Amino acid sequence: KLSLRKLGSFQNDAKLLQSIKRIKGRKYATAAKPKEAAGKDKAPKESQSFMMNLFRGVVQPVQVFPYPDVLNEEQTDTLNMLIDPVWKFFEEVNNPAKNDEDSAVEPHTLDGLWDLGAFSLQVPQEYGGLGLTNTQYARLVEIVGSHDLGVGITLGAHQSIGFKGILLFGNPEQKAKYLPRVSTGKEYAAFCLTEPSSGSDAGSIRTRAILSPDGTHYVLNGSKIWISNGGIAEIMTVFAQTPVTDPKTGKELDKVTAFIVERSFGGVTSGPPEKKMGIKASNTTEVYYDNVKIPVENVLGGVGQGFKVAMNILNNGRFGMAAALSGTMRAVTRKAVEHATTRIQFGRRIDSYGTIQEKLARMAMLHYVTESIAYCLSGNMDSGSVDYHLEAAISKVFASDSAWAVTDEAIQILGGMGFMRETGLERVMRDLRIFKIFEGTNDILRLFVALTGIQFAGQHLRELQKAFKMPTAHLSLILEEVTKRGLRSVGLGATPSLAQYVHPKLVSSASQAAKSIAQFGPAVENILMKFGRGVVEQQFLLNRLAAAAIDIYAMVVVLSRATRSLQGSYSSAEHETLMAKVWCSEASARVTQNLGALSSSESLDNFTSLSQIAKNVCENGGFVQNNPLNL
């Protein structure tokens, strides 16, 4: 007999075998016809990511509970020494209004930032940088984001993506050659991926690099658009198609390769600075490559590995965007609060009215969630995590959406004053708009979250289906998977518990989050069974699945952070508890609504109608109906 003590809910072997027989008949649309397995069970890939496991209905707490606390005493002291001078610099030296008006960062400001080491925050000290951790970096870019997003883009385009590929994928020779130049040599870097015909579809770039007959260099031809630092960068990470021979078939095919390109190689030119809605101070241009000779030793990350390099660079830098935008939200909310607590209307301060109170409270919650996600992510990265790509995508989506909403409400609270240029909020609003678009549009990233999670869940479902074909031979795999799923997939489990991870004051909110998790796994399975690989075309459903996933992640992160504050008796603990409770209450309701829409006949009919409405508008070249006067 098999011991089932660890399964808890099962009383005997017979009940388990009945469940196995019942599930054995399930047909998952994603699964190819399985071969009869022989020998040792081969389990699918495991992950430490909370989000990846959420899609298979499993609670993996290691990256969210407890809330990361990664800075040692020396790192904390170093950060404390940096915060004041950086803050003082942006308060006293940088002039965001002047930068915006001139569409360029003032030269003395750039010189000061180089002298501060702000352009090489994470470059190892042996190469001339400050060697900061991700969490230390997050705290400093938060200061930048609270003052000037245009300067923030200049800094970020340089180090968050510009030369980040050299840090992540560079060999020792490449690091020794280039990192000192981008750190103390005052040479700007840029990340060159986007092309006129290739925006979100990064794999469709047309820029090409052909290996020379003697094998010593590549010849690069093509162009890139909307490149931040494009007109000032000397060192560029450039992505181009290169012919690669498939080792299995022997056929030649194009694959993207990343290159380190210097302007001094010759043949590199830039267009004039673009006239933009916001972040005007950052330099944005087209970049052209005309027979640029690139030494073979400047291939970055391996021939044909460029897409992987690009995605890892973007993925690695997204936490910084969330941290910067949490700083932006702090700054604009401070202005809104200052106005609300001094403005008298109808004989009372306007912060005494419920309408203003709700605005301020929701601004505070959106900031709290954004900040909590940013530092949870940076903490996990500093702890050595490599499974964070879904969390990173969520951080970018949530932060950019929230910063826009918070700034919009700040302007509304200030009324006409908020609309005036001198207040500074209109500049922030213009600057913020690009954050929903670049480094992966929020729309694409939502689909990325949903589809990547579904793919991970599908792998486990396929293995489970194979195991059920021969349950006696694969009982260990079945038990392992069923246990991780909390037995809900076989209809015998209860809602997972998060109570053991949170402070007693947050148990009720943890139950709401756990209920959402319990709803999520079966919803993913139902979509997989219904659509199989065709799920990629079901974007109405995928967007709602992503929205539910984002809400669940936000819930567990704020529960974790608020728990730490309560356990540590922080002065803000009770305030954080209030925000966590309200957030979980409302987020869990949104999760139920979004997941319900996946199977609601009314919602599905509405999605079909929305699709047809859009087709009608596109076929008509705009709105179909005339104005009510028919004139």
Image: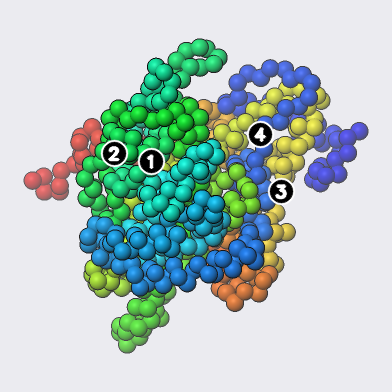
Three-letter amino acid code of the residue under disc 1: Met
Q: Nearer the viewer, mark 3 or mark 1?
A: 1
Q: Is residue 95 above or below residue 283?
A: below
Hey, which quadrant is residue 171 in on the image?
top right
Q: Nearer the viewer, mark 2 or mark 3?
A: 2
Cα separation, mark 4 vs mark 1, equals 35 Å
Q: Picture coordinates of residue 497 (x, y %)?
A: 70, 54
Q: Which mark is residue 45?
A: 4
Q: State the SS at label 1.
A: strand
Q: Is residue 543 visible?
A: no
Quick one: label 3, few (<14), some, or many (20+) residues within 10 Å?
few
Of labels 4 and 3, earlier in sequence is 4
Quick one: label 2, few (<14), some, or many (20+) residues within 10 Å?
many
Of labels 3 and 1, earlier in sequence is 1
Of labels 4 and 2, earlier in sequence is 4
**Viewer-nearest residue: 63 or 595:** 63
- Is residue 525 shown left or right of residue 82? right
Three-letter amino acid code of the residue under disc 2: Val
Q: Which residue is mark 1?
A: 236
Cα separation, mark 1 vs mark 2, equals 10 Å
Q: Picture coordinates of residue 597 (x, y %)?
A: 48, 44
Q: Picture coordinates of residue 535 (x, y %)?
A: 49, 31
Cα separation, mark 2 vs mark 3, equals 57 Å
Q: Which residue is mark 2?
A: 287
Q: Given the current orientation, which residue lies at the most extreme right position? A: 1
Contact flag, marks 1 and 2 (Cβ < 8 Å): yes
Q: Residue at x 25, y 41 (%)?
A: 270
Q: Which mark is residue 494?
A: 3
Q: Given the current orientation, which residue lies at the most extreme top position? A: 250
